[in-house]
Amino acid sequence: MTTVQKTQVAIVGGGPAGLLLGHLLRLEGIEVVIVERASADYVLGRIRAGVLEATLTDLLHKLGINERLKAEGLPHDGFYLADGEKLIHINVGELTGKTVTVYGQTEVTRDLMDVAEARGLQIVYEAGDVTLNDIESDTPWLTYSRDGVEHRLDARFICGCDGFHGPSRKAIPDSVGRVYEKVYPFGWLGILADVPPCHHELIYANHPNGFALASMRSETRSRYYIQVPVDEDIALWPDDRLWDELAVRLGPEAAARMTRGPAIEKSIAPLRSFVFEPMRHGSLFLAGDSAHIVPPTGAKGLNLAASDVAYLSDALIRFFKSGDEDGVAGYSEKALARVWKSERFSWQLTTLMHRFPGTDAFDRRMQQAELDYIAGSRSARTAIAENYVGLPL
Ligand code: FAS
Ligand code: PHB
């Protein structure tokens, strides 16, 4: 027996992109159903991004889902690039007039989940085997299984917000899709600990042992990362060894202020740059990690999902409210223009701040020369700052 449900927009994936898109469409009275493979607890258990551009905080403000963000988010108007003992302050507030907000992706996701039911946003968790059908028609539909029952969901559009490993991108024929990818020869080992941060702003460090990042979630919860080989066994990194290495890579000043504590989460994330074109095929749209991945160095991943959603929600609202098809027709080109600029910035900062295996003395001199140039040039710091706070939509 298969149940059949009709809606206007079916969203695959209940992560930040899917939830944000669902809420923005519901705000305009558009019928939406989100099908999410995992449980709500599993989605909340993934520790990921920590820095929000105004691109994202403005959308949460528009939705009126920003009370906790306003109360607990930490406005930041600068960050540091460290090259050995040299600290370069990128004063984004002074250089761009904008700030970023430190507030965990997990908290954004929680806030969006908490008000879903009250706002008529239906989320089906633990929806297995999601399969997309007739995406080249005006009557696409998907199927999923839950508790042994098959379900069919008919919609006018399907939005693939199902991340890098989801089915939506793969539903677009190989003859249509174009993939651009760069896999980096290292990953980030991240630790989350309930200890106060070592600095009130983020520090991105390029050390002979490798990259390190000192970040945070609040004034009592810190998030740190170090570059490790892409196939590193996390068992080789007990907490004490990781704290010792962080102290070395972040330098004596930060180390002196570093508070150690037990990891409440520790994981290794691979780094890649990835773009799939187009971000629309027939009645299927892609948004967020389903279409693109950036190395987290530029803090762009979550924020790029937000800009995709800003464009896509606007296009769909225009379609359903006034039959205007220009927005949906132009979505892929518009979103990709911003995606590629963020890909460039994330690749540039990753190349500048990491130690690549097999590079020679000349490559290292290039990194040092670029950091020296940034330290001495307001224009160079402004270029970094305007990308870090987020380019205009
Ligand atoms: P997500 O991957 O967050 O969500 C996709 C959702 O689709 C998931 O809930 C998944 O369960 C669901 N899904 C997948 N397959 C499905 C199926 N078959 N059926 C139904 N649902 C399905 N960004 C930063 O800015 N800073 C960081 O430090 C950072 N660290 C990261 C660390 C890791 C390990 C990863 C993987 C990403 C990191 N990112 C970081 C990027 C990350 O924050 C993403 O940009 C962000 O989660 C994008 O959100 P979504 O596009 O919603 O994708
Ligand atoms: C984080 O706090 O998780 C974080 C912050 C900035 C980045 C990447 C990750 O560039």
Image: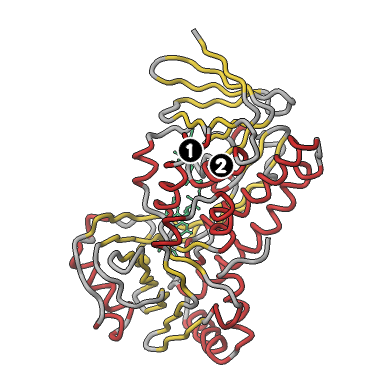
Residue drawn at x 23%, y 61% as measured from the top left:
237
Name the secondary structure under disc 1. loop
In three-dimensional space, the C-alpha distance between marks 1 and 2, rounded to whole angstroms, equals: 7 Å
Q: Which residue is mark 1?
A: 116
Q: Amino acid at mark 1?
A: Ala
Residue 161 x %, y %: 55, 41
Q: How is the image coloured?
A: secondary structure
Residue 223 x %, y %: 33, 64
Left or right for 310, reference 163: right
Residue 165 x %, y %: 49, 40
Q: Nearer the viewer, residue 294 or 18?
A: 18
Left or right for 230, reference 294: left
Q: Which disc, if any, is residue 17?
A: none
Q: Quadrant of residue 392?
A: bottom right
Residue drawn at x 56%, y 15% as measured from the top left:
4
Left or right for 256, reference 356: left
